[in-house]
Amino acid sequence: MDRGHLANTDEGRTPAGEITYLEAITAALRDALREDERVFLLGEDIGSFGGAFGATKGLLEEFGEHRVLDTPISEEGFVGAAIGAAWMGDRPVVELQFADFVTTPFDQIVTVAAKTHWRSGQAIPLVIRMPSGGGVRGGPFHAGSPEGWFVGQPGLKVVCPGSVEDAYGLTRAAIDDPDPVLVFEHKALYRRLKAPPPALGHRTPIGRARIVREGADATIVTYGSGVTTATGAVERLGVDVEIVDLRTVWPLDRATVLESIAKTSRLLVLQEAARSTGAAGLVLSLVAQKAFEHLDAPPALHAPPDTPVPFAPELEDAFMPSVDSTAQALERLLAY
Amino acid sequence: MPTEPCLELGSVSADERRALYRLVLLQRLFEERALALYRQGRIAGSFYDGRGQEAVAAGAGLALHAEDVVCPLNRELATHFAKGVPVADAFRNFLGRGDSPTRGRDGNLHFGVPALGVFPLVSMLGDLVPVTVGAALAFKRRDEPRVALTFVGEGAFSVGDTHEGLNLAGVWQVPAVFVIQRNQYSYSTPIAQQMVNTTIAERLFGGWSILCETIDGTDAIATFDAVRTAVERARAGLGPQAVEAVTLRIHGHAAHDDGGYVPDELRRVFEERDPVERLAARLALDGLSEDELAGLSADAAAEIADGLAVAEASPAPDPATLEDGVWAAPVGSGDPTNVQDFAHTDKEG
């Protein structure tokens, strides 16, 4: 699998006292490796090279090759091997170079990892980290948001950090968790998001959404890079809109979504995954079934068209939800 | 023509021979009984057995220590018994009982008993090769003298996961053992339609430098001896090992398949090499009387009958338990603000 040219998404220096989303992930891995002997990392080029995006830089040097394993280019093989190690009580953390490559170990994930506990009572404490998302001119094989394939799959947990704090906290929580957890990191956030470092040992509970900002007139339900986009749209319009960051897209935190709709009566779902895949349909279905009487407007969806992610800047910009396009969708919802 | 006895190998003790005989008998008698139950409609779904391959399942199973782990497939019931799985639990799984190893969630041989080091098989061929390698990787990383073993049919040699797993085993030099079940057919497809070079041992060594001895898989003593050697080499840190066991799948792929595509002359060759009869012939040469052999058969038959009686008295699964155990740690479990309890007590949504 190719790599490398997409790694440079750095947009500037990090202010003193802050760390990036990517540094938060590295810190989470380092802290987990330090605290728990069972934790080890495996993936392509994660050792001395430090990973395609640099998430594991310095970890081989600190922990050695029994904790940080470079693998051959064989995702079915090393995801399957991680399942076997998890069966033996280890806490493997797999890095896929790009989330798009999750097609290759799909069978190991849904056939073996997801169903083993239900069938046998054997927990599989497996973490698979993978950089997802567009905005980096990656094209159809390096910019996808395939989390939707796993939304609804019994036995899996699927998390998508949208903040520096959750990049650390969800990674730690995923490593603690006895179930297989897929962590979709957003590659455009790696160096763009900066914040003060989370406290050592901070955990973001899996299955819990977060109210990013409170509001009264509508709710935007989103996750991943959508959190930044939604915040930009709300600030641009100067409206009183609540933003819910799902953080975990499966299983869904239905309570937080429904409580917010009960308060605001309007829903905009924003996601970067193509409109007919992913968590959006689940959120819309939930609200239609459980919050129908609360609604003052038809629930709205702002998401890319049902195409793969295109390469050319003109096409990708048209594909991706932006602050502008999200603000327009929000205005339409508020005007209904 | 008299049955050709198993090889006389001084390395396999009298106790081990009796243990092997018990295991091949248990698989044979269990599967005959279960096939009858299936035909009577008392076992649902589909039915697979390993007739003709009992010696491989028994020999490999007996070669493992209690602390070793194994991923058996569909023809390896005796491996479960060798690892200590009770006959009653196996019947419970075939019958879909609520207290079976899968609690009714899966049937036939699709079960494991993690507490005994037995992983539940999945139907996708090749998947368990990397899983086995990963378990062996854990042993190597932790410097534990343990071995992980799995079986690979020749059909699985057409699957990518098998090659990726074997490659990882070679690159990482982990204590994994692969027992190749060369039973001639993958469902209806003969080996020559599965691969160009049908000498699997050559491919294992040429491709991944994994030593592979080819043995007669109808000979329980030879199989046990070869797999034990492989297991102990792996345990000693000599890296991944393999044994290719040549058999014929006597029955069809499953009970609906009469195996009519197997040429009569091939079938006759292997029907004359019945693993149970070959081991009985060796035990007779060892000095066991007809009465003693009959006694061992009666013991195994009683074990089967007792296990079936226990299983048949076991409860059916309770539909209310269907959603139990999807996750080891359900989101919100043990938390009064459990998000799954909000505003909906029905199952949809």
Image (tube, coloured by chain):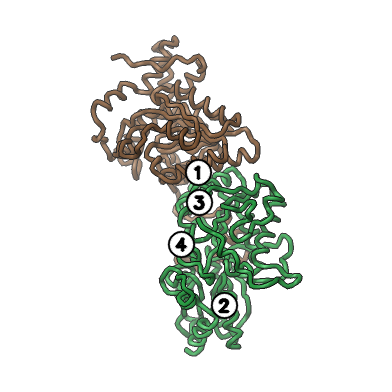
Look at label 2 and name its amino acid.
Answer: Thr
N-terminal label among 4 and 3: 3
Q: Return the mark for residue A75.
A: 3
Q: Few, some or many C-alpha atoms within 10 Å of disc 1 (few <14, some 14-19, many ≥20)? A: many
Residue at mark 1: chain? B
The residue positioned 70% from the left and 49% from the top of the image is A63
Task: Give me the chain that's brown.
Answer: B
The residue positioned 59% from the left and 48% from the top of the image is A70
N-terminal label among 3 and 2: 3
Judge depth for marks 4 and 3 and give the one in front: 3
- Secondary structure under tag 3 reads helix
Indicate left or right for B20 with A212 as reference: left
Judge depth for marks 1 and 3 and give the one in front: 3
Gap between marks 4 and 1 measured at Cα: 23 Å
* Cβ atoms under marks 4 and 1 closer than 8 Å: no
Residue at mark 4: chain? A
Judge depth for marks 4 and 1 and give the one in front: 1
Extreme residue in the bottom direction: A335
